[in-house]
Image: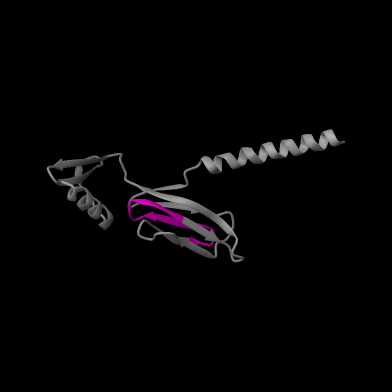
């Protein structure tokens, strides 16, 4: 009887460790600048907090769906709680630049970003991108 209990406890611990490892290995939620990502929740949300709203914005689609939008480059966090104050999600959010189908042209201290889908045209620059470019150019 004790052998089967310890075997059962060992199997439960192994399974729990197997499910916990991917959550730790996961880098959180990645959102591309100026794009949205849908986040589905396991249960209804009551409170949503974004650590730095200049990096990402969260809007409620319905009680179990959140839309995250990348507003500025960087890392922040997203905390979603239910009506009892229990966390549903507590994840790191990373906003990155879209590298596919875009080209950056450097002319001395000036940088121009082109969106090439399929023809290259100047792409929209958010305030965060403009600030980033000014900071990069300040060192020149």
Residue 82 location (% of width, % of height): 58, 62
Q: Is residue 125 visible?
A: no
Q: Magenta stretch: give its range.
A: 60-77
Residue sitting farthest toward the front: 139
Q: Is residue 29 magenta?
A: no
Taking the image as shown, residue 109 lies to the left or right of residue 89, namely: left
From the image, give the main secondary structure of the stretch colored magenta: strand
Residue 74 is a magenta residue: yes
> The N terminus lies in which quarter of the figure?
top right
Q: Quadrant of residue 104?
A: top left
| Number of numbered labels in the structure image | 0
At a point 18% along the width and 47% down the height, the residue shown is 139
Place of residue 80 in the rendered image (x, y in percent of width and height, measured from the top left): 52, 59
Residue at point 55%, 43% (across, down): 23
Way the structure is coloured: one colour
**Residue placed at 52% from the left, 54% from the top?**
90
In this view, 52 is above or below 73: below
Query: In screen coordinates, is 133 left or right of 50?
Result: left
Image x and y of residue 52, in percent: 39, 59
* Nearest to the observer: residue 94 or residue 103: 94
Q: Residue at x 44, y 60 (%)?
A: 50
Q: In the picture provided, is 22 more to the left or to the right than 116?
A: right
């Amino acid at each position: 009887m004790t052998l089967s209990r310890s075997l059962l406890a060992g199997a439960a611990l192994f399974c729990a460790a197997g499910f916990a490892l991917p959550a730790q290995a996961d880098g959180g939620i990645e959102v591309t600048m100026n794009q949205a990502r849908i986040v589905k929740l396991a249960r209804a949300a009551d409170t949503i907090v974004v650590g730095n709203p200049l990096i990402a914005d969260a809007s409620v689609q319905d009680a179990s769906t959140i839309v995250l939008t990348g507003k500025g480059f960087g890392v922040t966090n997203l905390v979603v709680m239910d009506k009892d104050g229990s966390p549903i999600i507590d994840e790191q959010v990373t906003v990155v630049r879209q590298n596919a189908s875009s080209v950056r042209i450097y002319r001395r201290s000036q940088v121009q970003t082109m969106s090439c889908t399929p023809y290259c045209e100047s792409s929209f620059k958010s305030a965060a991108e403009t600030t980033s470019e000014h900071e990069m150019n300040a060192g020149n």
